[in-house]
Image (cartoon, rainbow, N blue to C red):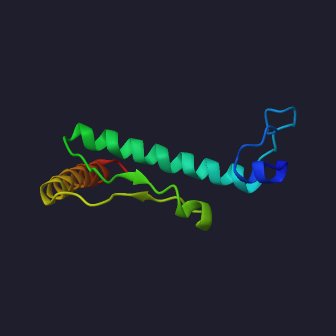
Amino acid sequence: MTTQRARHYGKSVRGPAAGRPERRRSLMQRLLSARLANAVAAEADLANALALAGISLPGLAADRQRGWLTGTFLVDLGAAHPDAVSRLAEVVRRGAEVESAERRAAPR
């Protein structure tokens, strides 16, 4: 098998570990990696908050595919059981009511 063919099939003896310096990531790659990290952190934050309320969204996940193309990584909430969605709405409503009351009570 020729060296070129071996490389094509991923069987090349040479690689990043074969004495060649690792390629530096571009500014865009670093920026997108930071944006992905933010989406993953937001996903974990929401999952933890939902767990405190006894809610689980099985489809909750950072969208790791489209962000590399669009530059914006989103958190997909996925499909959920209607009971979980109703409970989520209840928890959000209560939190919004408390926050609204705190803003009204705060001195201006």
On the question of residue 51 being in view, the answer is yes
Direction right: furthest residue:
20
Residue at 20 percent of width and 50 percent of height = 91
Residue 53 percent location from the top left of the image: 21, 41
Residue 94 percent location from the top left of the image: 19, 51
On the question of residue 26 being in view, the answer is no
- Along the horizontal axis of the image, is 94 left or right of 3? left
Residue 79 percent location from the top left of the image: 26, 61
Above or below, 5 against 54 in this view is below
Direction front: furthest residue:
1
Figure disc tally? 0
Residue at 23 percent of width and 49 percent of height = 98
Q: Viewer-proximal residue, 108 or 68?
A: 68
Direction left: furthest residue:
83
Q: What is the quadrant of residue 80 in the picture?
A: bottom left
Q: Viewer-proximal residue, 58 or 72?
A: 58
- Along the horizontal axis of the image, is 45 left or right of 5? left
Q: What is the quadrant of residue 21 in the picture?
A: top right
Residue at 16 percent of width and 54 percent of height = 90
Residue at 15 percent of width and 52 percent of height = 87
Q: What is the quadrant of residue 78 in the picture?
A: bottom left
Above or below, 98 against 85 in this view is above
Q: Viewer-proximal residue, 14 or 105?
A: 14
- Along the horizontal axis of the image, is 7 left or right of 86? right
